[in-house]
Amino acid sequence: MEVRNCRTCGRLFNYIGGNPNMCPACRDDLEKKFQEVKSYIQDNPRATIQQISEDNEVSTNQLRQWIREERLQFTDDSPIGIECENCGASIKTGRFCENCKNTMANTLAQSIEKPKPIEEPKKKPDNKNKMRFLEK
């Protein structure tokens, strides 16, 4: 383990790889904020990102991060939308639109060479064990 400073409060904490550079206390506070935002969205499905940000004291960047992580999802009639990172189409959650996801999946599937069936080598006829006749 290594010791790092929390990016939010500046306190030292034992950093475990893969986690954001936040101490456990700040991570818990952020998770509580997430639950508040989630409840707020359920109660106010037509709210904009700016309204959600102001009413819950959360930055719009944090909201967009939760949307990209697919932790927050919105209905089709919601005014909230973010852009697909590949083509720029409006999406409700995630990083890519369905069309781009399918294209990437197909490209990846085609780039992986499928193994060819293994053919057993043909055996040469064994002439040692055959009966032989001498012609006179």
Image (cartoon, rainbow, N blue to C red):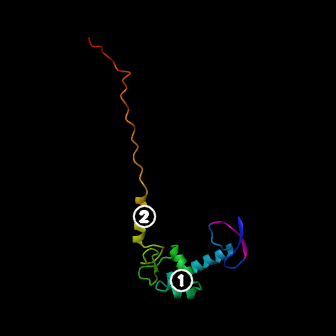
Q: Which quadrant is the C terminus positioned in?
A: top left
Q: On the image, which quarter does residue 118 sit in?
A: top left
* Mark 2 surroundings within 10 Å by alpha-carbon count, few (fewer than 14), some (14 through 19), many (20 or more): few
Looking at the image, residue 91 sits to the left or right of residue 12; the answer is: left
Can you say whether 129 is above or below 37 in the image? Answer: above
- Residue ID at (48%, 76%): 73
Q: Residue 105 carries which label?
A: 2
Give the x, y percent position of residue 85. 47, 75
Judging from the image, what secondary structure is the residue with disc 2 in?
helix
- Residue ID at (40%, 67%): 103
Magenta residues span: 11-17
Give the x, y percent position of residue 33. 60, 80
Looking at the image, residue 31 sits to the left or right of residue 70; the answer is: right
Q: Which residue lies furthest to the top in this view?
A: 136
Give the x, y percent position of residue 32. 61, 78
Can you say whether 24 is above or below 115 in the image? Answer: below
Q: Residue 40 carries which label?
A: 1
**Of the image marks 1 and 2, the number of the one nearer the N terminus:** 1
Q: Disc 2 residue type?
A: Ala
Q: Disc 1 residue type?
A: Tyr
In the image, 19 versus 123, the foreground residue is: 123
- Residue ID at (64%, 78%): 29
